[in-house]
Amino acid sequence: MNPFDSRFWRDFDWALALVPIVLVSFGTVFIYSSQPDEAYWKRQLVFMALGLVSMAVFALTDYRKWLQFAPFFYGLALLGLVSVLIFGSVVNGARAWIRIGSFGLQPSEIAKLATILMLARFLAQPRRGSLTIREIAIAGGIVALPVGLILLQPDMGTALTFFPVLLTMLFLSGLRKRLLAVAVCGALVAVVLAWGFVLKTYQKERIQMAVMLMAGDTDQVSRQQKRAQGYQSIQSMIAVGSGGPFGKGVLQGTQGRLGFLPERHTDFIASIVAEETGFAGALAMLLLYGAVIWRLTGIAKLSADRFGALAVMGLAALLGFHIFVNLGMVLGLMPIMGIPLPLLSYGGSSLLMMFMGFGLALSVRLRRFVN
């Protein structure tokens, strides 16, 4: 479509374009509040600018071209995941970053969008009836390749984000209830096997601590273990609870600015939001996220083809899972898994990936009447 045509701007989804910008802008303020002596907020602004450019490029590009380029993009993402295992830098115990000067690129973030496009390409193929076991196995294989490489980093949290995308897209593609039940049972078996053979001791301790905190049964945990495994959750809940109805005021928080809360500019940025703006600010944040997911699901319904609908719903599932798990971590209801809050948390690779996805969704909406 021609951006100089008035119909382009009339059909453009302004809400989906502007709400993420508002979220990133707010997030940058709280990144500065949590790390005033660092340059994180400046880098976040740079990546927001790059993200806006990428969103514009994806919006102006016919999304159906990704039917042709999805395998190439997917292969490039896999190559990036292999490269990071060889040349990557270790951050927080995971070799997940490729350093470019003062900036870092996280290939696993780009792999999320590439996998969504590849899955949408495969599942959008014409078929009669429900998905077959063979088709489900192939879709699972598409996800298994990047997940396996990410687990080698190791980054369990990022690996988990691929599975809600897979289940959502399989369900929308015609997954029979019986096969869905088999998939759920398989997931439970995988969890048991992961507990016994994959998870490291510190990961198990984090899960155990989260369960105890959720049950309010911290008396059974030694003081040393609380400090070692539950410190982040406890400090996060202190920050959230101290915010009250309207917060302490922007740039007036203590848990973040005084350094009590670790990873406050990434995994626990929502704790800073709650501390400084209170329940009102947290509610506004949730409403903005709800608006984005609502727009994505609306665009998927309007899509002219299955590829566009599946790709957009895959992005919505990814966004929703990130929000759900991150807020669960912040409230002490889930173990700390290193899953950031999209758009608000510091992270250039995540920001670029999300803006690319929003640009793709905008393209789907703009071309909803094209045959």
Image (spheres, rainbow, N blue to C red):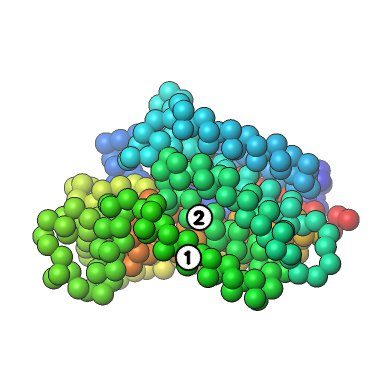
Q: Choose between 356 and 233: the one closer to the eye.
A: 233
Please rate how many residues cluster around mark 2, counting C-alpha atoms within 10 Å: few if below 14, some from 14 to 19, many from 20: many
| The C terminus, quarter of image | bottom right
Compared across the picture, whether 22 is left or right of 121 comes to: left
Residue 224: image quadrant is bottom left
Please rate how many residues cluster around mark 1, counting C-alpha atoms within 10 Å: few if below 14, some from 14 to 19, many from 20: few
Residue 253 can be seen, yes or no: no
Residue 267, how many percent across, how many down? 36, 51
- Kindly state the secondary structure of the residue where label 1 is placed: helix
Q: Is residue 29 above or below residue 80?
A: below
What residue do we see at 47% from left, 67% from top? 188
What residue do we see at 80% from left, 70% from top? 129
Report the residue that reaches farthest toward the left: 223
Residue 41, how many percent across, how many down? 38, 39
Compared across the picture, whether 4 is left or right of 322 comes to: right
Q: Choose between 205 and 275: the one closer to the eye.
A: 205
Numbered tag placed on residue 17 in the rendering: none
Type of amino acid at the residue the image marks with label 2: Thr
Which residue is identified by label 1?
A: 189
Residue 282, how many percent across, how many down? 38, 65
What residue do we see at 53% from left, 66% from top? 186
Residue 250, how many percent across, how many down? 30, 54
CA distance for labels 2 and 1: 18 Å
Which residue is identified by label 2?
A: 161
Report the residue that reaches farthest toward the top: 101
Type of amino acid at the residue the image marks with label 1: Val
- Kindly state the secondary structure of the residue where label 2 is placed: loop
Residue 201 can be seen, yes or no: yes
